[in-house]
Image (cartoon, rainbow, N blue to C red):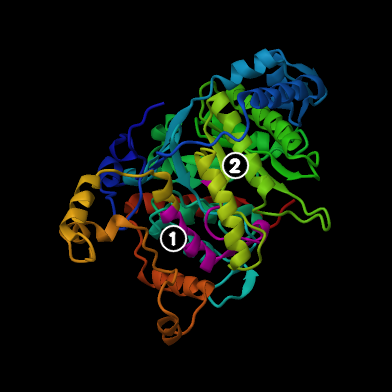
Amino acid sequence: MTDASPATTPNARRSGGRDGRRALRATPMASFPTLVRDIPVYNLVPDEAVELIHDESLKILEEVGCEFRDDEAIAMWKAAGANVTGTRVRIDRALLMSLVAKAPEEFTLNARNPGRTVRIGGRNSVFVPMYGAPYVRDLDNVRRYGSLEDLNNFHKLAYMLPALHSSSSICVEPMEIPVPKRHLHIIHSALTHSDKPFMGIVTSKERAEDVMKMSGIVFGEDYVKDNTVVVSITNCNSPLVWDATMLDAMKVYAAHNQPVICAPFALCGASTPASAVGAVAQVNAEALAGVAFTQLIRAGSPVIYGQFMVAVDMKSGAPMGGTPEAAQMMYLMGQLARKYRLPWRTSGFHVGSKLNDAQAGYESNMLMHAAILSGANYIWHVAGWLEAGLCCDYSKFVTDAEQLVGWYKYAGGVSFADFKDAMAAIREVGPQGHFLGTQHTLEHFEKAFFSPSIMDFNSFEQWSAEGAKDHATRGRDKARQMLQAYEPPKMDEGIAEGLKDFIAKREEVLPDTVN
């Protein structure tokens, strides 16, 4: 795998070619580089406990096995030497770990604007907006089905918000577009309204292939054969089932050297034991089986070890978001990921609250602390998430992103660069003075402290005079202002026409209803 930027890649398909790609310039829109964490990770349990979980996970795969409900996958496991009975695959630990070891510890995720390219793995972390909501809470605070206009707006906001490193893809479902054609418009929106990295579609083999073809139009067909340009999510159906749809998507993306996230979707207490440690052992087994399979497809292809683990409310059966158990399970998964030397994904601001309110804030803080301190590399669902993922909220999208600026600074560690000058300022001011007019303050006040614009720290009187707006209202106001100021990133005209042509041709042959 090479890390050349698409701006210098030869053999472009459409008019504009290499020169057109080179013309993709870094826009004046601010954007943070990959977050390189400069604070320690937190190990929740001793190494012996990690080894215990690891050993039990391997026993699950050796003794119980995992379902791979796909004929081609079964044939691949048989050829690799696994013990296969029907669709049940039992994997010897030596075979499993030899495959897991082939996955790279880090990789580069390329954006169509090379200035937005990020690094995944190691001490690197990236923030990615939410994915998959059927509903939206709009700029008028009305909850309704999502539309293509909403999706476009969220991709615009993701492009404009500096602490978001990706545009994701399905922030909200464009419900008015027929399902068989929907993926085309989702990917088109992510690629045109933003020039940051994006995410693919996994709901069928053909849709994954369409994503790769659209990526080839934008980046160059030769470029995407070996360079990572799109991350896609594949979920194990807990307990212990990798189904044909996910495996088909895995085969498409891994064969093209594109990273997939192998993340079991676990409702702890329902699809796992009602035990945080027991759930981690099961989810670890499921994730490792997925990671190993990607290496059967293409050894050395990048993959992200992952999890989505939430407890269910034992009174109602509903999934809960920012609970202490969810945070504890993140820490355990982080320790396991470091053991396996794998990049890993978790979720940051996934909450159960229905509104952008105090509950949402409590839940978000619980989870993001764990995500950062557990060393997660791909921190997903960090903008917009409400109602356990059923709703994407304009207000929460921008207020979450503002909080990410603070988390970015928190995880970047403490700088001593100006310490000597600060000590000199103390000597300059002496007792009973103030520092507002010192040279040190004048040089550093803009960047010295986290300075949010949506949160309100004014006096009660000033807050009242400005309309006594709550945080959610200020978030909607901010989103509206940003969308009014949006200017699209440049795209070569030949590439833009190529995308439109491809979508038109695919729509001619795709049905309007799902069989």
Q: Position of residue 46 (x, y in %)?
A: 62, 27
Q: Position of residue 403 (x, y in %)?
A: 46, 58
Mark 1 crowd level (few <14, some 14–19, many ≥20, 10 Å Cα)? many
> Helix, strand or loop at disc 2?
strand
Is 106 left or right of 60, judged from the image as shown? left
Asked if residue 174 shows in the view, the reply is: no
Please identify, in this view, whether the residue under mark 2 or under mark 1 is nearer the observer.
Answer: 1
Is 109 left or right of 67, judged from the image as shown? left
For residue 217, what is the image quadrant? Answer: top left
> Is 395 colored magenta in this rendering?
yes
Front-most of residues 395 and 426: 426
Residue on which disc 1 sits = 402
Query: In the image, what residue occupies the spot 71% across and 12% down?
Result: 81
Query: In the image, what residue occupies the spot 36% across and 31% down?
Result: 3
Residue on which disc 2 sits = 233
For residue 441, what is the image quadrant? Answer: bottom left
For residue 513, what is the image quadrant? Answer: bottom right
